[in-house]
Image (cartoon, rainbow, N blue to C red):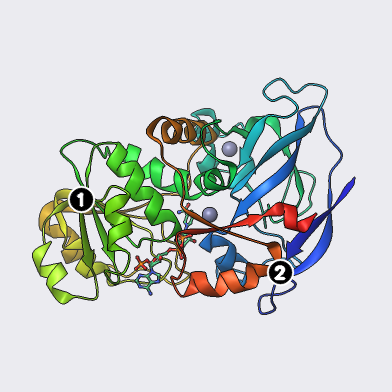
Amino acid sequence: MLTVNAYAAPSATEPLVPITIERRDLGPKDVLIEIRYAGICHSDIHTVRGEWGEIHYPQVVGHEIVGVVAEVGSEVTLHQLGDRVGVGCMVNSCRECENCLSGDDNYCLNGNTGTYASRDKDGTVTQGGYSTHIVVVEDFVLRVPESIPYEAAAPLLCAGITTYSPLVHWNAGPGKKVAVVGMGGLGHVAVQIAHAMGAEVTVLSQTLSKQDDGLRLGADHYFATSDAATFRELRNSFDLIINTVSAVIDMDAYLKLLRLNGTFVSVGAPPEPLPVKVFSLFDNRRSFAGSGIGSIHETQEMLDFCAEHGIASEVEVIAASEINEAYERVLKSDVRYRFVIDIDTLR
Ligand code: NAP
Ligand code: ZN
Ligand code: ZN
């Protein structure tokens, strides 16, 4: 066992605090990663605060992890000492269900093993990336392209794949009008990816305060959802809406923005239901869908796509001691555009 420094939530209501945790001894297929940076995803906050259900405490979160390979097990072939690597939202899956066999391991029918707050194969609860090291089986470790700086790459491991996957699945590309709702961690990456795919991109943000950034990142249009005129003007416009909002929104109003056969995909995961009037779907034969992260194979494809197109996250690097303050700012939508923890401040 390796004892490592980490930052953990002691309960749903207390601030995160420094702690030590154990990482398992390396199995033959395991990789030990010395973590450099870990992004703060809104899912970390939903999780530690028990908003998605009860969890065990203390819990270390963080599933946007980049670092360097520090040690490899005797049978590891995919990674070598010193490689730049990443770990996203999952660290294993059953490998034998229909979805795992088709390569859709994020949709493992037996439940993929989440990077944190998940029951691992050995019965322990997984602990995430706000820590100095992590041990992960080699085929759930991603290669981080050289051209993307570590800190800007970290958020791609969740924010990147979570938006890339539905954009690919629903064919964002030339001739398609795509709206991104919410320009936070996921949203600001979604804008870049959808633009690089060739789609016409519109940001729907609460206000126009981030308009300059949105246009610089590749959006063609930018509207404030606090302005009722936005919903009148954009009625029946979009082929695809990617919703990244962490709270409940007025679904009916957003569905009406879809043109014929358009799809509204929520990746945003508020704890409460998103209510839908079926009549808002009947008009224009609209669809309401959800999408959960992406497969390991697709995550590697996304990282390579981002490297090829010069896409990365815009980050505010913080020390581990600033995590609680950062959480409060994320809750106020006051982040440009992802907090990333410098893990050297934990050593
Ligand atoms: P984030 O950085 O906090 O961004 C969310 C954005 O939503 C905010 O920046 C804000 O954008 C907008 N927003 C927040 N509260 C709002 C409200 N009350 N009404 C309208 N808009 C609001 O969060 P994130 O890390 O991108 O994560 C977003 C959501 O996706 C979370 O629920 C997270 O758990 C979920 N998620 C899901 C998956 C998946 O696999 N499906 C993966 C990762 C994350 P503006 O300031 O532009 O309005
Ligand atoms: Zn996440
Ligand atoms: Zn499976």
Where residue 228 appears, as percent x and y from the top left, is 16, 76
The nearer-to-camera label among 1 and 2 is 1
Question: Callout 2, which amino acid?
Answer: Ala
For the point 70% across and 78% down, the residue is 14
Circle 2: element type: loop
Q: Quadrant of ligand 3?
A: top right
**Quadrant including the N terminus:** top right
* 334 relative to 66 in the view: left or right: left
On the image, the x and y values in percent for residue 269 come to: 45, 62
Residue placed under numbered mark 1 in the picture? 220
Amino acid type for the residue under numbered disc 1: Asp
What is the residue that sits farthest to the bottom in this orientation?
A: 13
Name the quadrant containing residue 47: bottom right
Locate residue 305: give its quadrant: top left
Name the residue at 62% across, 39% down. Answer: 86
> Is the residue indicated by label 2 positioned so its CB lies within 8 Å of ligand 1?
no
The reply to whether residue 332 is visible in this rendering is yes
Could you tell whether 177 is left or right of 139 in the image? left
Q: Is mark 1 within 8 Å of ligand 1?
A: no
Q: Nearer the viewer, residue 166 or 109?
A: 166
Please indicate, yes or no, whether residue 94 appears anywhere in the rendered image: no
Q: Secondary structure at mark 1?
A: loop
Q: Position of residue 16 (x, y in %)?
A: 71, 71
Q: Quadrant of the C terminus?
A: bottom right
Residue at numbered disc 2: 9
- Crowd class of label 1 (few under 14; some 14 to 19; many from 20; radius 10 Å): some
Give above or below for 82 relative to 163. above
Mark 1 and mark 2 lie on one chain; the one further toward the N terminus is 2
User: In x, y percent, where is residue 343?
Assistant: 71, 53
221 on left or right of 166? left
Residue at 56% across / 30% down in the picture? 146
Which disc is residue 244 wearing? none
